[in-house]
Amino acid sequence: MYTIKTYNSIAESGLNILRQENFTINNDDDQPDGIILRSYNLHNVDIPRSVKAIARAGAGVNNIPVQACSERGIVVFNTPGANANAVKELVLAVLLASSRNLFDGVEWAKTLRGQGDQVPSLVEAGKKEFVGTEIKGKKLGIIGLGAIGALVANDALELDMEVIGFDPFISVDTAWNLSRNVQRAMNIEQIFSACDYITVHVPLTDQTREMFNREAFSQMKPGVRILNFSRGELVNEHDLNEAIEKGIVAKYITDFPNDRILGMKNVIAVPHLGASTKESEENCAIMAAKQLKDYLETGNIKNSVNFANVELPYVGRKRITVIHQNIPNMVGQMTSILAESHLNIADMLNRSKGEWAYTLIDIDNKVNGDVLLSVEARIKEIKGVVAVRSI
């Protein structure tokens, strides 16, 4: 029986997947096998030694101590693409609304309350202050053509925009789904220099942190509009404010308000609503629950942020899973132990991601329980192995 603990309100459609045979949800259990959460901050939580996997019902995992989890052999999952449509719709909504100065105009209209019969004439006299621009024919630069970026690109084409995309790491699946009419930028500078609108859809890493800085802004067209529905830290806010004051950035639309951003002019701060739809929450919960369940039951990994995808059909044989450092001769040492224990390997798969690797081994013959325990103990003694589990 696997016990799952939740740290946020998770959609019932996802929890129902974990209310099946071999699973129970118990938030009072201090030794759960798995955790499922949304934005709860785990950095200050003493994660029990019993935890084998953590599933984030969402894309960002900055609320999870991923490195520490890797070192303990805890697989961390996220749900890329599950909220993509929700974010795409909001990006397109604010793209249109900000171009027409809709937000400013609506707020101004509210100030006319109490003017009685004069309101219509005041509207006609004042509306010239909110003249906007149409997006048709304008150039939209998209940095990051993952699940969200690709959807934005395809729909922006349908709105008659000229779309230029930059993503040096585009996946094969995304490439298949991307319209052939999306132009490819060979470098990010092409996006900066050519586009009227720029929307960014990349994760926050050491390489992307503050990628929008003084140097980047200096390459942009005056009057550019920038949309950030990925992470606030992608933008150097001091440099952004400078670019706004210089007239380089006409509008900055972000889903990540903070005190400084709220005090800047020409900034539209959305209260982190990108994935806030009922459909998105359900999609993320279902995806997270399925990945967590599959890993605990079969050892298969899909959409982990700290380990490679490793999927081997589970046909009921005894299976050994090993999480270890990505260093030479690890697999050789494991297979030697199995051979010395007279165990035949029916199937095996090893994949690595950065400094970590994961190995699945299916045993061909029936295994005595004591023998299996001995094999697990010996594999765990190998230098560089951090977790061993049999299924």
Image: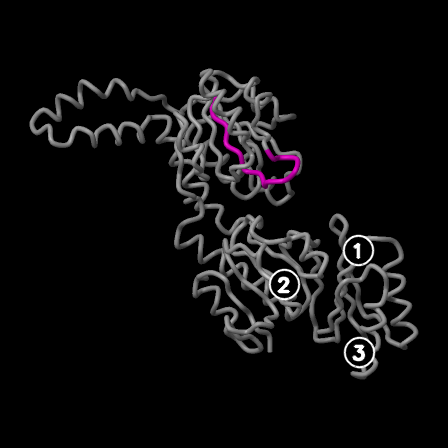
Is there a contact, CB below 8 Å, between mark 2 and mark 1?
no
Give the x, y percent position of residue 332: 89, 61
Residue 53: image tag: 2
Give the x, y percent position of residue 33: 61, 70
Query: In the image, what residue type sits under mark 2?
Result: Ala
**Dot 1 crowding, Cα within 10 Å, few <14, some 14–19, many 20+:** many
Relative placement, left or right, of 78 versus 312 is left
Query: In the image, what residue type sits under mark 1?
Result: Gln
Task: Report, in whole angstroms, how far the alpha carbon at label 3 lies from the one at label 1.
Answer: 22 Å
Residue 289: image tag: none
**Dot 2 crowding, Cα within 10 Å, few <14, some 14–19, many 20+:** many
Give the x, y percent position of residue 238: 52, 26
Name the residue that disc number 3 marks.
373
Callout 1: helix, strand or loop? strand
Relative placement, left or right, of 154 versus 375 is left
Callout 2: helix, strand or loop? strand
Could you say which quadrant of the image residue 340 lies in?
A: bottom right
Location of residue 79 with respect to 158 vertically, above or below: below
**Dot 3 crowding, Cα within 10 Å, few <14, some 14–19, many 20+:** some
Name the residue that disc number 1 marks.
325
Range of residues picked out in magenta: 196-209
Q: Earlier in the sequence, mark 2 or mark 1?
A: 2
Location of residue 92 with respect to 1 vertically, above or below: above
Callout 3: helix, strand or loop? helix
Q: Earlier in the sequence, mark 3 or mark 1?
A: 1
Q: Residue at x 25, y 18 (%)?
A: 128
Q: Earlier in the sequence, mark 3 or mark 2?
A: 2
Near-viewer residue (209 or 106)? 209
Query: In the image, what residue type sits under mark 3?
Result: Leu
Relative placement, left or right, of 259 versus 166 is left
